[in-house]
Image: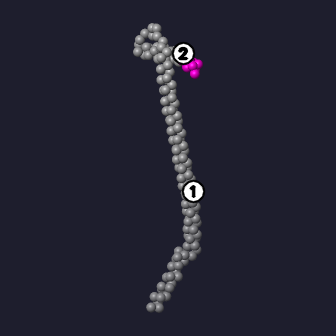
Amino acid sequence: MQSWIKQFNFWVEKNFRGNHRITTQMQRRIYGHATDVEIRPLNEEKAVQAAVDLLGEVFVFSVAVAALIFEVQRSARSEAKKEELRRQEMEELRQRDDELAREVELLKSKLQELDQLAQKRGLSGVFGFRHAHGEESKSAATN
């Protein structure tokens, strides 16, 4: 355990003291201060605190990224389901359209047959007008 702590402290000192130097130089440039001054290194306690803060932030951002990825995937699955339902509805509408088109064609052919029959027999022959008209005239003559 002691060796792990020593390794962690060495890593912290090496990385975060360098990070402190770079960050301080950047801040001095941004604020227009002199950058050629000596920057005092962080003491061990502040370096460890910076490392712990960074690890905490990395953890929080990791959880946030994981939640974001989960939400995006969930949303994508939901959209895919909606798209599949839309596709199925469109397919059903196409099938209904095809059925209606076949029904219209059938009705057109029946209408054409009726039209041909009407032309052969005459319109009154198709609907039985001649026969009914003939009976009316016979009954009127007998009365």
Task: Check the image and report above or below for 12 versus 36.
Answer: below
**Residue occupying image coordinates x 43% and y 9%:** 34
Q: Secondary structure at mark 2?
A: helix
Front-most of residues 69 and 137: 69
Identify the amino acid type marked 1.
Gln
The residue singled out by tag 2 in the image is 14
Tell me the element at label 1.
helix
Colouring chosen for the image of the structure: one colour
Q: CA distance from mark 1 to mark 2?
A: 71 Å
Q: Dot 2: few (<14), some (14–19), or many (≥20) neighbours within 10 Å?
A: few
Which residue was labeled with disc 1? 95
Q: Residues within 10 Å of mark 1 (few under 14, many from 20)?
A: few
Spot the residue most to the top: 37
Earlier-in-chain disc, 1 versus 2: 2
Q: Which residues are magenta?
A: 1-11
Picture coordinates of residue 92, whole percent (x, y): 55, 55
Q: Is residue 102 magenta?
A: no
